Image: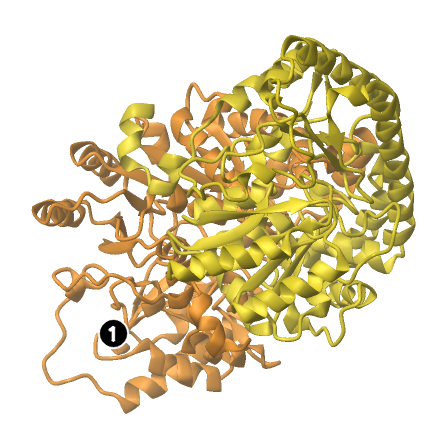
Chain colours: A yellow, B orange
Amino acid sequence: MDATRLQKFLSDSARSATRNEIRELLKLISRPDMISLAGGLPAIESFPVPELEEVTQHVLEEYGAAALQYGPTEGDPGLREQLIGLLEKDGNTNVTLDNVLVTTASQQALDLCARVFIAPGDTVLCGLPSYLGALGAFAACGAHLSGVPLDDDGMRADLLEHRLLALRREGIHPKFLYLVPDFQNPAGVTLSVERRHEILSIAREFDLLIVEDNPYRQLRYTGETPPSLGSLDRDGRVITLYSFSKVFCPGLRLGYVLAHPDVIARLVLAKQPVDLCTSSFNQFIAREYIIGGHLWPRLERTRALYARKREVMLAALEEHIDPDWGVRWTEPEGGMFLWMELPKHLNAKDLFQRALEKNVAFVIGNAFYCDGGGTNTLRLNFSYPSEDQLVIAIKRLADALSDLVRDEPAPQSAPADVKGFSEGLVSGSDHALTYLPLSLSLHEIIE
Amino acid sequence: MDATRLQKFLSDSARSATRNEIRELLKLISRPDMISLAGGLPAIESFPVPELEEVTQHVLEEYGAAALQYGPTEGDPGLREQLIGLLEKDGNTNVTLDNVLVTTASQQALDLCARVFIAPGDTVLCGLPSYLGALGAFAACGAHLSGVPLDDDGMRADLLEHRLLALRREGIHPKFLYLVPDFQNPAGVTLSVERRHEILSIAREFDLLIVEDNPYRQLRYTGETPPSLGSLDRDGRVITLYSFSKVFCPGLRLGYVLAHPDVIARLVLAKQPVDLCTSSFNQFIAREYIIGGHLWPRLERTRALYARKREVMLAALEEHIDPDWGVRWTEPEGGMFLWMELPKHLNAKDLFQRALEKNVAFVIGNAFYCDGGGTNTLRLNFSYPSEDQLVIAIKRLADALSDLVRDEPAPQSAPADVKGFSEGLVSGSDHALTYLPLSLSLHEIIE
């Protein structure tokens, strides 16, 4: 058995899940002096180690063997009771146990949504750009991804409607719309309240489900929290995914889903052959962590930590990026990322090569575009590096950019004023993905 | 959105994953006086609570935040080093890190094998009967299941070859053979050494992969341990799945896979969109549990516990089941189950109804047959109930059986001497599964 002989045994989806060059490039990131802005990792200093020492001891002493047994696929009822509390605090009303499913982190929820709703060839709508792990989960089930551009207010509702009309003319009814409304990964932008209502209205008009992915929602550092799509939904078409990875810690692999009971029942059936149930031990820990009152104080400290890091990165960009270079970036009100656009004639891949030579790394934005666009964009993470590292990293990035701008001057005709991301792609083609950089997952592009 | 309106959004596999009557029946099991032999749960008294108090505290004090971060998809390298040690102890040679993948329990490994190898319509070979969670994982990816009968020495190699020849005539090349060689779930039988060699030779001849599922292998109470198929494999066609659920505890959701590096690489790519990585915290705990020397002493105690329970159940069966009833059962050398066959004219479903009235439950064997056979069989679990409960449960089962035998006498012609399971099905039809009782998973049929 070798890789060649193995080919004939592979399923279609396995065959298309090939490694890519980005992964190879990113091996360079492991060099000792490298500072990586590429990852999507929470800061290790945000993790509640002392609280967990107390809580795990309590779980084992108080519940013992019960915490180590198989549990219900739906999740521990005691944890789900606590989650109802969190969901009500986030503006959701009339939440019952039947509306809540515990998942093995929200990546599993994405996979379950894919398995329940996507048959090979089905169309799924997503942002341009979108979270890579979601695109990977949808593509693994054979989804055709149709991208709708974002701007500083999140997904463009007008372009979403435009796309849906075009699809309708082709007789295509997309299965769902995938959105990260708050502090989007990768773009860092938040969907405006007005657009939330518009998009819900469009979803009703075109009878579309919405998968609302909310991993960063509680990580707001400035501005007002808009209502979630789930809390505005009146006809059970929104499936909202929450994660403990960014507000507690990723190492327990815990997330949860809020949806109509019939949707939850389907997700439960899909979860059984996948992992039977999420770790009881970790669910007991999360439950007692919430009951013990640890969630909110710790989250407050995490928010303060990230708010400072965000300020440091924005200040460093302001200081080191020459306005004449024609570079712009988002100023996210929360989350872990900001998004940078180079002038259209520059390629982020070229910047990446130069940046690596200067010992700083980021993710090339193109990886997040299901239509192959975004070649002039990049994602910068500010949650993981220390404040000192952020300053040095941005200085190095500015040096690399300075060299690139010098070596590749803009063409004679001045570029049009840029108002949204990837404007050139709005009327562009809409390719099915036969290939996705699945291997470029959160934790592999760090360190 | 209601169940009816939801239908149109569902993928084909979601649409076929319907709830079944067994699930409804099993709700009866929650009655207070019920003793359930239906589950597949380890005994809670086998769980290493004091060891885990020590180990989790050590992990948090020693490794702190590192144990709470995302980890590599392949699994924590330190844990994988320890797994190499376990695998070498089990007769495997030249195992490297590249041969080992940590999974979110072995149910995930089954799902990953399904995703990597099965395209809708592909044929997979399995035992008659087979572990339901495996059938569910394969069916969710659209597998056509082709069953090969077992007898007291495990899968019938002659019938496997017979089936493969028949499939070859139809131009069908099965993707893999699924086997639980040791103390099979549900039948409790172990594949003989001779048959292990025969089956490997058949796999070579027909160029077949083998998925060897070994969750119970370390739970042997009597007899000699035969070599695993993985350790006998010379051409990288065996994928061996191990689980910590039965030898440590299920609540951490940890398992591991031993396979050729190219197979592991494929499973890793498939795992990324599924859950990114298995819980770092739980992996650190398992690693330190093994390093701390807790695994083997605890396993020794678990084996002694289950050996006694097995003796108690076998003795109670001997005492209470009248030889004239024509009932036979397996005497497993390990694991958690034994298998009972009623005379062919009796239906285990009728026994189930009567047993519930007498406050004892089991799983109807038919659920484990992908071809709809095994209507006269049942699975009895001896790991979970206490010894006292086992005695009472078997007494109740015998009462129910006595009533059934009295009410439904055998037809005039004496039944043929029974030498293997489901003999009547050998030449029977080989149905594709359009429906599987997915909801009947381990933990739902207990308590």
Few, some or many residues within 10 Å of mark 1 (<14, 14–19, 20+): some
Q: Is residue B404 above or below residue B302?
A: below
Could you tell me which chain the residue with mark 1 belongs to?
Answer: B
Quadrant where the C terminus of chain A is found in the figure: top right
Element carrying mark 1:
loop
Residue B437 seen in the current view: no
> Is the residue A440 above or below the residue B305 in the image?
above
- A302 shown above or below B309: above
As displayed, is residue B374 above or below residue A385?
below
Report the side of A424 relative to B148 (left or right).
Answer: right
In the rendered view, does A103 fall on the left or right side of A135? right
Which residue lies at the image location 84% right of the left edge and 38% below the top edge? A46
* Residue occupying image coordinates x 30% and y 59%: B129
Residue under the image location 45 percent in, 51 percent down: B335
Q: Is residue B122 left or right of residue B336?
A: left
Image location of residue B438, percent across then percent down: 43, 64
Quadrant location, the N terminus of chain A: top left
Given residues A214 and B339, the one toward you in this image is A214
Q: Quadrant of residue B259?
A: top left
Q: Which residue is mark 1?
A: B326
Q: What residue occupies the far front of the structure in this picture?
A: A413
Number of marks drawn = 1
Residue A407 rendering spot, x and y as whole percentages: 64, 8
Amino acid of disc 1: Gly
What x and y, as percent, mark residue B385? Answer: 56, 65
**Front position in the image: A271 or A111:** A111
